[in-house]
Amino acid sequence: MPDIHVKICGLTHSDDLAAAVAAGARYIGFNFFPRSPRYVSPSLASELAADVPVGVAKVALVVDPDNDLLDAITAQVPVDMIQLHGAEPPERVSEVKARYGLPVIKAIGIAEKEDVAKIDLYARVADQLLIDAKAPKDAALPGGNGVPFDWRLLADKKYWTVPWMLAGGLTVDNVAEAIRLTGAKQVDLASAVESSPGRKDAAKMRAFIKAAQG
């Protein structure tokens, strides 16, 4: 099986971050969405980022951010990538890339076949894509809800013109099947490796990454 890159998102404590890195995470995500139980301030994220070793990408997750928020994050936190996880149009993706000079990951919510067309649209402007389950209409959060989608919707590989990550309801029990069905080379998760919202479990992270990498 090829080397599967794992992104652990929503790190809030230094010991959890160290455990994620030790388990083999290739991306570390800091969540700057205030309503999330995984929220961190730019000042806290700056402290956490200092412990991330070279070779592990630091990702800033934001939801429909204005430039003031992005200015505050990029001024304080040495992030490597920006993840846009809201309803940002393609034009905003291009604007963020140009303004901050950082690679942008665009999250795309999938629930049905019609949603898949958005992958091709955003592949023209984003550096990477995060293919996630579309949040339920009554959900308080745009992601991190632990809900999968029908992975068979991603069978048409013509849409995958840039690197992408699979997210949405991945667990130690289903990640191998998800990778088999979609051909994903990168996966992203938050809640499935937590002991409580915002706190990661070292054993769960090790088990998940082992399962993902076969």
Image (cartoon, rainbow, N blue to C red):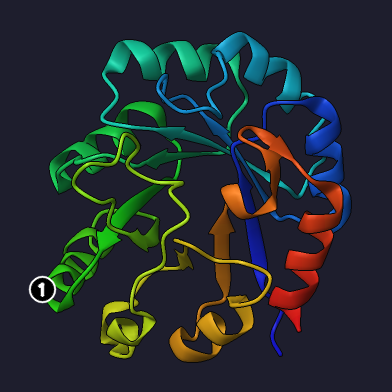
Q: Can residue 190 be seen in this view?
A: no
Pointer 1 local density, CA inside 10 Å: few below 14, some 14–19, many at least 20: few
Residue at 55% in and 66% down:
170
Name the image quarter holding residue 62: top left
> Helix, strand or loop at disc 1?
helix
Residue 7 in percent (x, y) is at 62, 54
Instruction: Identify which residue, 5 or 38, lies in the foreground.
Output: 38
Residue occupied by mark 1 = 114
Instruction: Identify which residue, 77 or 203, lies in the foreground.
Output: 203
Q: What residue type is labelled 1?
A: Glu
Q: In this view, does 137 lie above or below 46?
A: below
Instruction: Identify which residue, 179 or 36, lies in the foreground.
Output: 36
Q: Can residue 47 be seen in this view?
A: yes
Q: In this view, does 72 lie above or below 114?
A: above
Residue 128 in percent (x, y) is at 41, 58
Residue 166 in percent (x, y) is at 47, 67
Residue at 75% in and 66% down:
209
Left or right? Give the position of 5 relative to 90.
right
| Quarter in which the N terminus is drawn | bottom right
Left or right? Give the position of 61 relative to 66.
right
Q: In this view, does 193 lie above or below 171?
A: above
Instruction: Identify which residue, 99 or 81, lies in the foreground.
Output: 81
Name the image quarter holding residue 156: bottom left
Disc tally is: 1
| Quarter in which the C terminus is drawn | bottom right
Residue at 55% in and 58% down:
188
Left or right? Give the position of 4 relative to 149.
right
Residue 143 in percent (x, y) is at 39, 46
